[in-house]
Image (spheres, grey):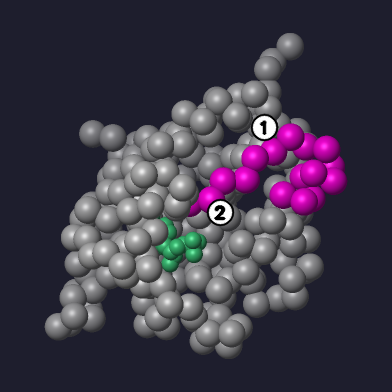
Amino acid sequence: MTTKRAPFIVVEGLDRSGKTTQTSLLQARLEKENVPNRLLKFPDRTTTIGKMIDSYLKSTSELDDHVIHLLFSANRWELASTIENLLNEGVTVIADRYAFSGIAFSASKVEASDATVPKLPFEWCRAPDIGLPAPDAVLFLDIAPEQARLRGGYGDERYEKEEMQARVRQAFKRIGEEAEEGTLWVVVDAGSERDVVAEEMWGSVEALVQRGLTAPVGRLWKDRVL
Ligand code: DGP
């Protein structure tokens, strides 16, 4: 008999896309179906690295753009072996954000003097996350930044500005188009009713969750390792 492992599901989205609500609903669904699961949130603000990220996001500290990018990535690597072990033990892992946010947000930073000039090249942003456990499915909650703003406005954190979110949305689009074989990339209309979004998300991953996988846990962007 072949041993199966559980799937790794990542939920990505713009700020105010309903991502946190939807990851909780997805987890509740797994509970209802008696599926062993674990919900992770990135950045994980509880670790030493996570606390540095938290203070940067709240603008209580300043860090060079390269440094904060590498800290976000390190914060994912801190949990890489935990993710792999859980999947191999049959525990479905849901991550609220992952490496795709890493690229999308960092590659969307632009020079103050010229908003068409990125501060960090796209490929440079991808590099530190090469080799992380690869998700089997990515559910991208898509919403127009204008619509997201109407949901009570953006908060006070660093990236919560409409122009930035518009660039982040484009970056996510590119990442989705370049998604690797073996990763299911689903664009979910996050502007729909809460329960409609939840059903679409569940419908996208139900078969993976119920059947499990025989293939070993993949590695992100493994073909890009020189
Ligand atoms: P959240 O806790 O989901 O609201 O995310 C916090 C903010 O950090 C949000 O604006 C997205 C951004 N973010 C998340 N992961 C990364 C990352 O890896 N790199 C960068 N630059 N930003 C990220």
Identify the amino acid type marked 2.
Answer: Asp
In the rendered image, the residue lying farthest to the left is: 113
Bounds of the magenta segment:
27-42
Q: Kindly tell me whether residue 62 is visible in this rendering.
A: yes
> Quick check: is 26 in the magenta stretch?
no
| Crowd rating for badge 1 (residues with CA inside 10 Å; few <14, some 14–19, many 20+) | many
Q: Is residue 212 above or below residue 52?
A: above
Q: Which mark is residue 91?
A: 1
Answer whether residue 30 is magenta in the image.
yes
Outermost residue, top direction?
Answer: 1
Q: Nearer the viewer, residue 63 or 190?
A: 63
Q: Is mark 2 within 8 Å of ligand 1?
A: yes
Quarter placement of the N terminus = top right
Residue holding disc 2: 96
Asked whether 165 or 220 is in front, the reply is: 165
Viewed as shown, does residue 81 lie left or right of 125?
A: right
What residue appears at the point 78 percent right and 61 percent down from the top-left corner? 199
The amino acid type found where label 1 is placed reads: Val
Q: CA distance from mark 1 to mark 2?
A: 16 Å
Residue 122 position within the rendered picture, expressed as x and y whole percent measured from the top left: 27, 58
Numbered circle sitting on residue 10: none
Residue at position x 27%, y 49% from top? 70
